[in-house]
Amino acid sequence: MIFSDQDIQQITEHGLTIQDAEHQIADFVRGFPYADIVEPATIANNGIQELNYDARQKYIGLYQEYAKTHTVVKFVPASGAATRMLRDLFTFLDTGELNDVARKVCEHARMLAMYDELNLDANATNTDIARAIVDKYGNMPKGLVPFHKYTQNHNGFNEIRTPIAEHLYEGAKYAVSQDNTVNIHFTVSPEHHDAFQELLDKIVPEYTNHFGKEYNVTMSEQESSTDTIAVNPDNTPFRAPDGKLVFRPAGHGALIRNLNNIDADIIFIKNIDNICTMAMAGDTIEYKGVLAGLLVFAQTKVFEYLHELDNENADMNKISDFIKHTFGVDVAPNRDELRTILNRPLRVCGMVKNTGAPGGGPFWVKNAGLQIIESSQIAPDARDIMNKSTHFNPVDLVCSVRDYMGNRFNLMEFIDENTGFISDKSYFGRPIRAMERPGLWNGAMAKWNTVFVEVPVTTFNPVKTIADLLTPAHND
């Protein structure tokens, strides 16, 4: 691949090397291999743990004691734009045809937390309502969009609340560190950094006063060096009208670099739009403690066995059985092999029962154990296996990123670079191909030790379309 001097300068300014760009183009040409799924992970001793009440209480207690002496961080990918959430309104305005989502939103607009901010006339038409919403929020990140309106005074709060605010509330309920501090980290787009900071400056003092806990809220941006080059349908570099190369964000998998910079003993990961009202948050708060406690339990055993391997007194058959039972990995009772498997980052992932069409979720993968696999990673001739899946991934993770000596892992060493997604997009009406690198909970964590746990569907309340804000989970 021959790049011009202007190309080389642009690539370098992006934090990439020529070799990086050439490697990306080669990935477009050859594509990414499909995941070699064997079967779905399911309950009943087949990869997903189903915990009874006593077990849940045990793990909650373990986590509560652990948090008293350790640092906890809540990590929230928050770069998602509201554009996709409002796509049905955009379509209605473009075509004039009132689709189901647009009709529902227009009929029940007064239920939306954002309604009062729209300043609509009492005689506003459907078009007026849709236009007001997209004009005000169409270019805004989800984190800043009003999601909930509390009509009654709840625990001192009586307000319009954004997802950012709800994550501050949640953080005080399950992510409190040893020094009584709530550490929350948002990943944001550069263009929205100031707006996030402005809102945080306003509401953090309110939450600090109410909960009596200090908030340490930080932000980071997705590094431009993780962007990927766009190509034409024939896999040659795509160029904008001015002749410059076009780069695109490489998806949430690029956030593994941001996660790698977090200094904590336990890290919760949850998407910005997966929140609910305070009245509906009971299961969410309970199961965060359950997942974290199970992580503490598993981590304690891992560290214990690694120290035994150091001291030459290890029962290697027992350790091999533990790895098989806990992580679903077959490993010979060999000291070096056991150490290699145990000394990895650890994650416990909540899994929700499928309520609709099966899709990406927890699977057994040949020679890779338990993995979270997206539907686009599954070959067409393996769709019958995918269709047997019983659970999906709601992005409900608790992570341990320190080794048994207390040192932080370099998370970049545990990525499967052979995973990724290629999709057809458009650039001002021109067709392009775009690439997303290994997803944060897919390929970017492919070499982590993994535990799956069933969690209730009430813990999963994403806002994928604006009509989701009309459901009980998002109304006081």
Image (cartoon, rainbow, N blue to C red):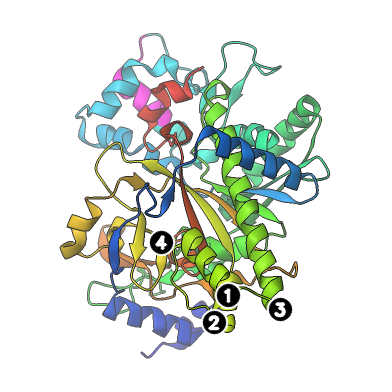
Which residue shows up at 56% across the image and 12% down it?
151
What percent of the width, then of the height, locates residue 406? 75, 66
Q: Please state which of the two labelled residues, at mark 4 or mark 3, is closer to the viewer.
A: 3
Disc 3: which residue: 310
Q: Please state which of the two labelled residues, at mark 4 or mark 2, is closer to the viewer.
A: 2
Contact between labelled residues 3 and 1, with CB atoms less than 8 Å apart: no
What percent of the width, then of the height, locates residue 284? 54, 34
Q: What residue type is labelled 4?
A: Gln
* Residue 225 visible: no
Name the residue nearer the viewer: 282 or 62.
62
- Tell me how far mark 1 sits from mark 2, CA to CA: 7 Å
Q: Earlier in the sequence, mark 2 or mark 3?
A: 3
Name the quadrant containing residue 161: top right
Image quadrant holding the N terminus, namely bottom left
Q: Which amino acid does label 1 sit on?
A: Met
- Tell me how far mark 4 sits from mark 2, CA to CA: 24 Å
Contact between labelled residues 3 and 2, with CB atoms less than 8 Å apart: no
Q: Is the magenta stretch mostly helix, strand or loop?
A: helix
> Up-down: is 362 above or below 335?
above
Q: What residue type is labelled 2?
A: Asn
> What's the magenta region?
123-133
Name the quadrant containing residue 155: top right
Disc 2: which residue: 334
Q: What residue type is labelled 3?
A: Asp
Q: Earlier in the sequence, mark 4 or mark 2?
A: 2
Within the magenta stretch, is there residue 128?
A: yes
Q: Which of marks 1 and 4 is nearer the N terminus?
A: 1
Name the residue nearer the viewer: 170 or 51.
51
Numbered label attached to residue 316: 1
Q: Please state which of the two labelled residues, at mark 1 or mark 3, is closer to the viewer.
A: 1
- Tell me how far mark 1 sits from mark 4, CA to CA: 25 Å
What percent of the width, then of the height, locates residue 292? 61, 47
